[in-house]
Image (tube, grey):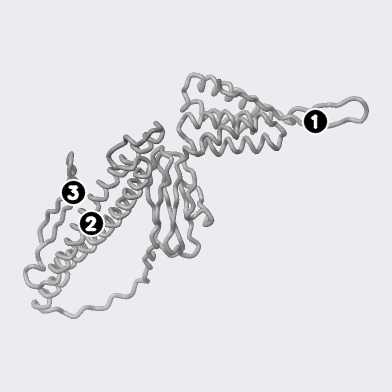
């Protein structure tokens, strides 16, 4: 059975003597909003009873916007939990408990706090860490400000897609899309030092160029030819390689961590016979599966990173050579290779 409370708004003023007058509502606008909130609440309750949570939750939200009621908050938290929005539901249940405590509604406070306590072990958390943040750095998650006090702290988030965006005066913007699954784990996003934003230079009067002989023309063509393009590609390949190596290292460490935690539960990485408790066995299986997946991603990162770094070195050395080699175009293609048992990358190109 779904708990159900409705709260109304009323103001009461005492009158001298033996009579009291309760004044409900003050304006026609307030009465209209209250009526709309009640209609939305009733319809949302019917949709939730039919397990149509994606339709019910927005109606609860609109009802709560029009009329702040503890009962509406409780039902919205229940609806969010059914949607899988565990962090939002957990926070709303705590808000209900606090409001009920202030109102002296002990039964409602107890119910809300029990629901919050049941959700807490299931929460997914996300930590945003900044390396050497610039002055006046601003961080947002899904458009909401993340204060500096919350940097480096694992905070509960709803499972799904999130966007981390970082800005600072005089720096280039940085953002990253993060997808967190519905699991009771903490995921981390590390924000690198922001690069300086390009400075716009004032245009200067063009100086007349001296006439160039035919030999000068050939030399200028060589200097601005293939070596410049090869240098750019070398930098790109090197950056991709370093990023891939860093990614492989992170997933390798996470795989080792999950495997170590699994060993604490069942002693051996491939045998679950020592797990006596079914919940412990399920956790062991989850950790082992995560460790294998993270290990495979680490292999791909190391492979792609190694290819990228080696390619950058080759391109840089090629760009330094002179003669006809500097006039040829440089093309590079890096393709990931995914098989049933093997992971890797294939590199093809011309120099």
Secondary structure at badge 2 equals: helix
Residue 29, image x and y in percent?
68, 30
Please indicate, yes or no, whether residue 69 appears anywhere in the rendered image.
no
Residue 311, image x and y in percent?
16, 61
Q: Which residue, given by chain and number where applicable, does mark 1 sit on?
A: 12
Q: Which mark is residue 305?
A: 2
Q: Nearer the viewer, residue 146 or 209?
A: 146
Measure the alpha-carbon separation of dots 1 and 3: 73 Å
Secondary structure at badge 1 equals: strand
Q: Nearer the viewer, residue 159 or 273?
A: 273
Lower sequence index among marks 1 and 3: 1
Q: Which residue, given by chain and number where applicable, does mark 3 sit on?
A: 344
Q: Residue furthest right?
A: 17
Lower sequence index among marks 2 and 3: 2
Q: Quadrant of residue 171?
A: bottom left
Q: Which mark is residue 128?
A: none
Relative placement, left or right, of 245 versus 60 is left
Of marks 1 and 3, the one in the foreground: 3
Image marks 2 and 3: residues in contact by CB distance under 8 Å = no
Quarter containing the C terminus? bottom left
Please indicate, yes or no, whether residue 75 appears anywhere in the rendered image.
yes
Taking the spot 18% from the left edge, 49% from the top edge, the residue there is 344
Taking the spot 6% from the left edge, 69% from the top edge, the residue there is 324
Measure the alpha-carbon separation of dots 2 and 3: 10 Å
Of marks 2 and 1, the one in the foreground: 2
Secondary structure at badge 3 equals: strand
Image marks 2 and 1: residues in contact by CB distance under 8 Å = no
Figure check: 108 above or below 150: above
Residue 268, image x and y in percent?
30, 42
């Amino acid at each position: 059975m779904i708990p159900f409370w409705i709260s109304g708004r009323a103001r009461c003023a005492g009158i001298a003597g033996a009579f009291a007058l309760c004044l409900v509502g003050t304006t026609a606008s307030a009465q209209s909003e209250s009526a709309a909130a009640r209609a939305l609440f009733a319809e949302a309750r019917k949709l939730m009873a039919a397990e149509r949570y994606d339709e019910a939750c927005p109606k609860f939200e609109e009802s709560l916007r029009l009329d702040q009621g503890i009962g509406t908050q409780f039902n919205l938290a229940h609806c969010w939990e059914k949607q899988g929005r565990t962090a939002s539901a957990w926070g709303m249940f705590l808000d209900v408990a606090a409001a009920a405590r202030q109102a002296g509604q002990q039964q409602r406070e107890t119910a809300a706090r029990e629901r919050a306590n049941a959700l807490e072990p299931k929460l997914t958390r996300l930590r945003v860490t900044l390396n050497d943040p610039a002055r006046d750095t601003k961080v947002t998650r899904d458009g909401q400000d993340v204060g500096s006090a919350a940097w480096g702290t694992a905070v509960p988030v709803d499972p799904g897609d999130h966007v981390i965006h970082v800005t600072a005066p005089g720096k280039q913007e940085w953002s990253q899309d993060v997808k967190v699954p519905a699991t009771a784990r903490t995921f981390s996003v590390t924000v690198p030092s922001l690069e300086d934003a390009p400075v716009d230079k004032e245009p200067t009067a063009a100086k007349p160029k001296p006439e160039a002989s035919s030999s000068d023309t050939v030399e200028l063509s060589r200097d601005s030819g293939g070596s410049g393009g090869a240098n750019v590609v070398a930098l790109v390949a090197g950056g991709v390689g370093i990023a891939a190596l860093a990614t492989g290292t992170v997933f390798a460490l996470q795989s080792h961590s999950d495997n170590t935690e699994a060993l604490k539960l069942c002693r051996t990485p491939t045998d679950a016979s020592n797990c006596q408790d079914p919940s412990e066995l399920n956790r062991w299986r989850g950790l082992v599966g995560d460790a294998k997946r993270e290990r495979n991603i680490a292999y791909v990162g190391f492979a792609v990173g190694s290819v990228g770094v080696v390619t950058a070195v080759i391109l840089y050395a090629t760009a330094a050579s002179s003669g006809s080699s500097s006039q040829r175009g440089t093309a590079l293609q890096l393709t990931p290779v995914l098989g049933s048992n093997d992971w890797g990358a294939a590199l093809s190109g011309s120099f």
